[in-house]
Image: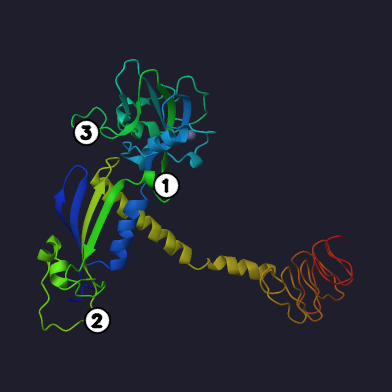
Amino acid sequence: MQSHDELEPTVRIREVKRDRVNFVLENVDLAFANSFRRVMMADIPTVAIDMVEIEINTTVLPDEFIAHRLGMIPLVSSNCEEAIRYTRDCTCLAGCPFCSVRLNLNVSCHDSHTLDITSEHLELIPPNDRGQWDGEQEENTDGDELTKRPANFGQPVGKNEPGAPPVLICKIRKGQELKVKCYAKKGIAKEHAKWSPCSAVAFEYDPYNKLRHTTYWFETDKRAEWPVGDNGKEEEPPREDEAFDYMAKPNKFYVEVETDGSLGPQEVVMRGLAELQAKLANLILGLKPQPEVDHAEQHANGVSHEGGWANPAGGAGAGAGWGGGGGGGGASTWGGNEASSSPTGWQSTSPSGGASSYGGATVASGGWGSPAAQASGWSL
Ligand SMILES: [Zn+2]
């Protein structure tokens, strides 16, 4: 495999359908391709039912069973980034239209046939003109999230669409009833798999196993028992006499993203890239050294140098602050051990024989927690 350091990454889409996309990603690292796959599966926010108030349940299934089944129903989550906020970022107490979507389920059976309760019965409750749900306690919230929602935001995927089979929740007979209030919230699949927009992300590279990243288990004939898939057509089969190139790296990845319908495949891929970019930007920010100005300030205050907070050991003549060890001739503040006579003051140190402590001890002072039997800086 040739070097690809100087080549730009490319994406070639092989097939796009309403709920899936198949593409070939080239000239990227294996680590990048795999991070991209994992971000698409676990880090893209969607909405899913997260809180359920069961008013009547006379079905054969227990409450928690039904609550769990409701949570797993995919809901339309287009533009989730802007159209809804996380409840933890909201000013409301337990959920409002800016951070939740409300759905009602109210079905009862009155004849002798078995009735299927499905996602078709879930009814979206839109907020009123004041951005509140009728009959709920008014919350003092403000935001433009509601204007950024598509009309069917929060509705079960495939509802009212001919040919789309609904999700079965429960079956009931005559006299049984299910009445439930549901609150869907924004979340990611790292917290719970119900928030994943993907039902599957398939990923393959090196279909001929030239890199020997895997070992095939076989009975008699490896080639016959492990046929090469369609992706093999994209690559050169290895020659019999070809030597193993242990320095080779994969650079062509075959990806198929299948969504559960809560987001379209295009949105999943684009959001996945944006999410990965944001994560890397955060990492770069975290690795940046502290700005210079902080160090200068610490020196000016004598904090880090002489008897500072983080000083591992007070040197001779230097005061030690908390965490500082004993200093010969140096006095110390809280946490310091040894002390000698010296005037004191919070954060102030003198170059030799100086000491400092909170509250100011004049004669020898071990600070807070000090084993020294003398006066302590704190309590004086
Ligand atoms: Zn809220």
Q: Which residue is mark 3?
A: 164
**Element class at badge 2:** loop
Q: Residue 26 location, x and y as percent?
A: 20, 64
- The residues bearing labels 3 and 2 have C-alpha atoms spaced at a distance of 49 Å
Q: Residue 261 location, x and y as percent?
A: 27, 40
- The residues bearing labels 3 and 1 have C-alpha atoms spaced at a distance of 25 Å
Q: Which residue is mark 1?
A: 192
Circle 3 Cα neighbour tier, 10 Å, few/some/many (<14 / 14–19 / ≥20): few
**Element class at badge 3:** loop
| Residue 246 circle label | 2
Amino acid tagged 2: Tyr
Q: Is residue 34 left or right of residue 303?
A: left
Q: Picture quarter containing residue 33?
A: bottom left
**Residue at the top extreme?**
110
Q: Residue at x 81, y 78 (%)?
A: 353
* First-in-chain label (1 vs 2): 1
Q: Picture quarter containing residue 159?
A: top left
Amino acid tagged 3: Ala
Up-down: is 255 above or below 350?
above
Up-down: is 44 above or below 372?
above
Q: Given contact means CB atoms under 8 Å apart, are the residues at marks 3 and 1 in contact?
A: no
| Residue 378 circle label | none
